[in-house]
Image: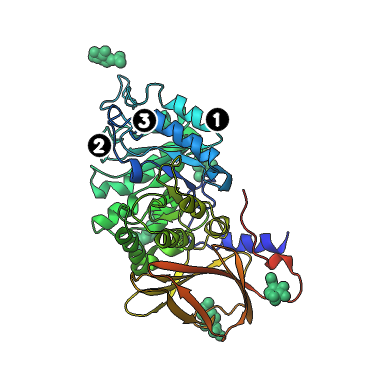
Amino acid sequence: MTVLSSILLLVLSSYGSEALDNGLALTPPMGWLTWQRFRCNTDCKKDPDNCISENLIKRQADCMVSEGYLGVGYEYITIDDCWLAKERDNNSRLQPDPDRFPSGIKHLAQYVHSKGLKFGIYEDFGSKTCAGFPGSEYYMQTDAQTFADWEIDLLKFDGCNSDIKDAKYGYPAMAKYLNKTGRDILYSCEWPFYNWRDNVKSNFTEVRSTCNMWRVFSDIQDSWTSLTSVIEYFVKNNHQFQPFSGPGGWNDPDMLLLGNFGLSYDQERVQMAMWSMFASPLIMSVDLCNMRQLSKALLQNKYLIAINQDKAGVQGKLKVVKGTVYDIQIWTRPILPQGCYAVAILNLKSGGGPKMVETTFKELDMNYTTKYNITETFDNEYIGTFGLDEKLIFWVNPSGVYMFTAIPATSDDDDSLKFKPWRK
Ligand SMILES: *[C@@H]1O[C@H](CO)[C@@H](O)[C@H](O)[C@H]1NC(C)=O
Ligand SMILES: *[C@@H]1O[C@H](CO)[C@@H](O)[C@H](O)[C@H]1NC(C)=O
Ligand SMILES: *[C@@H]1O[C@H](CO)[C@@H](O)[C@H](O)[C@H]1NC(C)=O
Ligand SMILES: *[C@@H]1O[C@H](CO)[C@@H](O)[C@H](O)[C@H]1NC(C)=O
Ligand SMILES: *[C@@H]1O[C@H](CO)[C@@H](O)[C@H](O)[C@H]1NC(C)=O
C-alpha cells in the first residue's frame, strides 16, 4: 500500500457518520440542471429554444460534450421541475408532457447516455411538485421503478406541498425504493433546506445516510446579493454541516451562476472558488451552447476543479475574518496529499480598488511544516516559499477572491508531496 492510499484510507474512515451506501458521489457530483436558467418555461410555441423540452436537453447534452465540459468532469445533465404531464397515466405511472417530450423520457435518457453523459430527473415527495405537477406522495415505489425503467441516473427530490414532519420519513423511504430498483441512482435531496425554512433542526447524520447531496439553504438567484447570502449562511452555520460532508455525501449550496447575467467576472471567480472550498457539487445552469469565453474558462479551470474534487473531500472552514464585519474572509481547506491546503481570501466589499490583505501561515493555523510553497490557483502561478511567521501579502479585488494552494516545501524531489491537477 502506498503512503498516499494509506492516508486516503485514514481520511475516508474518519467520518463520524455513514454515507448512503450506493457507491456514488465519492467526489462532489458535477453536471448541469435546467432550473436557474430555464425555470418553468413551458411555452415552446413562443420560445422553442428555451422551453423545458427534449430539444433543449438534447442540445445542451450535445454542447456539454462538444464544448469540453464532459472532458473536465461535468457528467450529469438533469431536468428540474415542469417536465411532467398534468396527470399520471392509467397505470398511475408518471408521464412526461407529450408535446414537449414526444419521444418519451427513456428515449431521452438513452440519447444522453449515447453522448457519454448521465441523465437526471426531478420529483417531489409531496402531493404536487413546486410548479403544481403530480408529486410522488403515495406513489414513491412506483415512481422509483419508473425512473429505473427509464434508465435515470440521478433523482433530485424536492419537498413542496408536503408537511415538514413527513420529510423525516419521505426522504428515507424514497432512498429505500431507489435502492430496491437495483439501479445506481444518485440521490439529491432538498431536505435540510425545508427544515431550515420551517425552523426544524436537521439531523445531518440521518441526511448523510439517506442522500448523496443535500441542499442546505434557499434557491440561489442570478445576483451577487444572492451569492453572498449563501456565503453568509455558510459563515454562520458551517459548523452544523461541515463535518458531514465527505465521500458519498455533500452539502449543496445550489447551482453555479457562471455564464448568466447577474455576476461580474470577479464575482464569478468568487463562486467558483468558494464552491471549490466548500467541496460543493458543481452544477451549472446556463446555456452551454452560448457561453462567454471567460465564464467557460472559469467553469473548466482544472486547478479549481482539482481542489473541488479532492478525494479526501474535507469541506473548508472560515479561519480568519478581517476588516469590518465579514468583508475580508480567509477560508482554508485541507487537501491531499497530507499537509497541503487550499486557501481562499475573499473580499466581499464592492467599490474602490483592490484591497491589500496581510496574513501568516501561523494566523491560519497552518503548522504542518515549517515552510510552504504556494501557488496561485486560477493561473497556476508559482509564488514562492514562505515560513510560518513570514508576512504574506495579497491584493484582492472588490467582490473578488485570491486563491492559492500551499504544499510543504521540501528540498528533495518527494513526488508524493506535489499537488497534481485533477484529470479525468
Ligand atoms: C442497496 O443497499 C445495500 C445495503 O446498504 C447496498 O449494499 C447496495 O449496494 C445498494 N444498492 C444500490 C443499487 O444502491
Ligand atoms: C385512460 O382512461 C380514461 C377513462 O377510462 C380513458 O378515457 C382514456 O382514453 C385512457 N387513456 C389512456 C392513455 O389509455
Ligand atoms: C440523529 O439521528 C441518529 C440516527 O438516527 C440518531 O442516532 C441520533 O440520536 C440523532 N440525533 C439527534 C440529536 O436527534
Ligand atoms: C497547529 O494548528 C492547529 C490547527 O490546525 C492548532 O490547533 C494548533 O494549536 C497549532 N499548533 C501550534 C503550535 O501553533
Ligand atoms: C519548494 O520550492 C523550493 C524552492 O523553489 C523547491 O526547491 C522545492 O522543490 C519546492 N518543493 C516542492 C514540494 O515543490
At 55% from the left and 47% from the top, the residue drawn is 73
- Distance from Cα at disc 1 to Cα at disc 3: 18 Å
Q: Secondary structure at mark 3?
A: loop
Label located before the other in sequence (3 or 2): 3
The residue under label 3 is 53
Q: Nearer the viewer, residue 381 or 314?
A: 381
Which residue of the protein is positioned furthest toward the bottom in this rendering? 389
Q: Is residue 218 visible?
A: yes
Residue 156 image point, x, y percent: 38, 42
Residue type pointed to by label 3 = Ser
- Judge depth for marks 3 and 2 and give the one in front: 3
Mark carried by residue 128: 2
Q: Residues within 10 Å of mark 1 (few under 14, many from 20)?
A: few
Q: Is residue 248 visible?
A: no
Q: Residues within 10 Å of mark 3 (few under 14, many from 20)?
A: many
Residue 159 image point, x, y percent: 29, 45
